[in-house]
Image: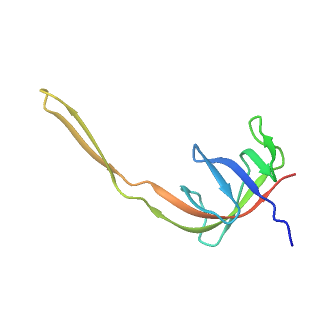
Amino acid sequence: MTLTKNKIAIFETGGKQYRVKEGQTIRVESIPGDQGDIVTLDQIKLLSVDGKLSIGTPNVFGASVSAEIVGSGKDKKVTVFKYKAKTRYRRKNGHRQDFTDLRITEISSE
C-alpha cells in the first residue's frame, strides 16, 4: 500500500485567489503562453501537505504551483447597461473576458 500526499494550495493570479489540488483543472484570468506550456505560479498564500499547514506573510517562502496550459479563449458576453430615469440617459456596453484553462501538475514546497 502506498501513501499519497494530500497537497492543497491557495494561490493568487489576476487579482483572485484559487484553492487547488494536484490534477485539478481550473479557469483563471488570461495568462500569457501557448497550449501545452508549463506555467509556474509562485504567489502561494497557503499550503497544506498531509495536514501540515503553512500560511504565508503574505506568501509562503519556497512554495510554487506548476500548471500546464490546457486552453484559452473568451468567456460569454456580459452586458453592462446604465440607466437614469427621466433624464434620457442610457448607455449599453458589452464585455468578454479572456481566460486560460490550467491543469495543476505539481504543488511543491521548500
Is 52 displayed left or right of 29 in the figure? Answer: right
Q: Toward which corner of the image does residue 30 lie, by quadrant?
A: bottom right
Residue at 77 percent of width and 53 percent of height: 64
**How far across and down, in percent of the image, does residue 84 sit?**
20, 29
Q: Please say if 91 is above or below 107.
A: above
Q: Please say if 34 is above or below 5.
A: below
Q: Please say if 31 is above or below 16.
A: below
Residue at 37 percent of width and 58 percent of height: 76
Closest to the observer: 10 or 64?
10
**How far across and down, in percent of the image, does residue 44 sit?**
73, 46
Taking the view exactly as shown, the residue that stands out farthest to the top is 86
Q: Looking at the rendering, in which quadrant would you find the N terminus?
A: bottom right
Residue at 76 percent of width and 41 percent of height: 59
Closest to the observer: 26 or 72?
26
**How far across and down, in percent of the image, does residue 24 sit?**
64, 63
Marker count (numbered): 0
Residue at 59 percent of width and 71 percent of height: 35
**How far across and down, in percent of the image, does residue 93 sit?**
28, 46
Q: Toward which corner of the image does residue 86 lie, by quadrant?
A: top left
Q: Please say if 49 is above or below 24.
A: above
Q: What is the image's colouring?
A: rainbow
